[in-house]
Amino acid sequence: MSLPAFSRMVVVALLTLGLLPMSAQTSTQSGTSDSNTQTTNSNTQTTKKKSTSAATASGEPQPAKVEIFTGYSWMNLNGPVNGFDKPSPFLTANQLQGNKGGFLVEGSYFFTRYLGFTIGTGAHFGNNYDADEANAGPVVRFPMGHLQPYVRFLAGWSRIAPNNAEQEDAFGFAGGGGIDLRAARYLSIRLFQADYVRSQQKFPLGSASPIDGVRLGGGLVFLGGVGEELPVSATCSASPTEVFAGEPVTASVSPINFNPKHTLDIQWSTNGGKVNGKGNTVTIDTTGVADGSYAASAHLTDTHNKKAVATCQTAFTIKKRLPPTITCRATPPSVEVGQTSAVHCDASSPQSEQVTIATQCQPGNASGQGDVSVNSTGQQPGTITCTSTVTDQHQLTATASTTITVTAPPPPPPPPPPPPSLALRSVYFATAQPTVKNPKGGLVKSQQAILTGIADEFKKYLAVKPDAKLVLQAHADPRGGEEYNQKLTERRADATKNFLVGQGVPADSLQTEPLGEQHQLTADEVKQSMEDDPSLTPNEKKRLTRNMRTIVLAANRRVDVQLNAPGVPQQESKRQYPFSAADALSLIGGREKPPAPKATKKSTRGATKKGTTKKGGTTKKGGTKKGGAKKSTNP
């Protein structure tokens, strides 16, 4: 089959493939239009669930599925032609030269909006050579409204016939692109097409001949499978869709199928507040709007194509404000008169707004913001009621009450029992006792008995007053020297302390003060002590008075006992000489006996025998008159 015949068959086939889709599309246009109308209505209903939308056709052409190109082509090839014995009158130095005209027929099918596959053929005729080809390969287009640039790469069969006689077939390829101008729904004009072509022929008796050149073309492009022009539309949305009055609502519109290179005029309106701003996104001020449902609408117009118009609507709701809530409690819920309880409240707003709390308590007049301290001082037993009010920023309020029970205080506890009383008495020592050799001497039995009683009582006292102390103040009569008397009183104080310790009194509860001959009792003080002693008879008091000097000396050979305890008045021992003690003669001599029955002469005479004591008188030899004492030089 010759190349021209093959080319004619390809052209017929491509034209048939191009016309069939166009015919089918034309015959079904009415049905498709109805179907599209139904789809648009359906889409409109669906869109209304989200936002009310209206749309019109945008007028923008849609890319075709099938493209059939036929047109004029001009080609210029260059290259050596090897294998001819004699120079050809149509070849210059065996080189292909000259521009040749011809035609191209191509068909393209697009799998996507941009990518397709092209198959085509062409033929160029001239005096010095003919060139025919049939190629196929991928094509990529770039729909831009009415203009559509494209690029492609084709490869396939190439035939060159120098001198229009010798034909040589070989593999060839072409690569280039062009621009189509959309003239009608099913027709475009190929403004230009430029390709670089190359092949390598091997002519008889010659080596391989590389042939390349440029091919230019233009013509008509018949379109098939053209989609319906997509209508412009818009969707509106609101965020948030539920707000409280005074809170802003953001409304947005998204244009659909509008030319992105054109400016849109967007007009907003709402029945629920005031629109602030312009453009795709605006803010709606809902201040003062009552609770309920409202809508915002957008009207879009293409400023370059007044037929491209769309509207949409979105809904939002103004919610009803709820009052705040509050709960209160008193801690502690019950107090005694004079005690304090704290009232604490927990409050919140359903709208998450800031709230304030005010509390008023009666009786008591306690009030304040937030937590309130209620003091029951001066209140009568009963109930204090506290009412707390919470207020939000929109003056919505709620109240809560809590009660505090006030009880009478319990009776005060009985006072602690007083410490046991101590019968303190001073103790007396014999003259010059105790001595250095006998530090325990001089403390006769009657004085030991006094100390024993003091020890027993003081141990009980310590159980109540553990920090109490006994101070032992030792004295001496003034007859010894100062140093002697000081040492003597130290021994008397230590003897007294040691005795008390021996009776179980803690040593650290005893304190000694040897005073020497300080703080001497006067004769008047001693006489008054005798007058206050109920154990002495009047006659004994008279006789003791006649021996006052001896009695005063004996009264100053003593140890006074002093009680010191925190919170208790200081207590001094009673200074009363033990005239009635059985061993008092060991201290000062004999004493008057009780009156005896009337004696007979014989008895009376016997009473005056040598060595006996005459009542009321002195012995004949060395005896001691009752109530008197031997003169001593020791204290």
Image: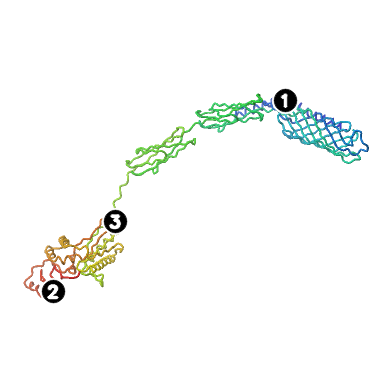
Residue 443 lies left or right of residue 598; in this view the side is right
Q: Which numbered disc flags the more N-terminal residue, 1 or 2?
A: 1
Instruction: Using the image, determine if residue 40 lies above or below residue 443.
Output: above
Instruction: Using the image, determine if residue 416 lies above or below residue 257.
Output: below
Residue 367 lies left or right of residue 487; in this view the side is right
The quarter holding residue 600 reads bottom left
Q: Badge 3 is on which residue? A: 566
Of all residues shown, which one is farthest toward the front? 93
Please state which of the two labelled residues, at mark 3 or mark 1, is closer to the viewer.
3
Q: Badge 1 is on which residue? A: 29
Q: Badge 2 is on which residue? A: 622
SS at badge 1: helix
Of all residues shown, which one is farthest toward the left? 601
Q: Which numbered disc flags the more N-terminal residue, 3 or 1?
A: 1
Q: Amino acid at mark 1?
A: Gln
Q: Amino acid at mark 3?
A: Pro
Instruction: Using the image, determine if residue 307 lies above or below residue 505.
Output: above
SS at badge 2: loop
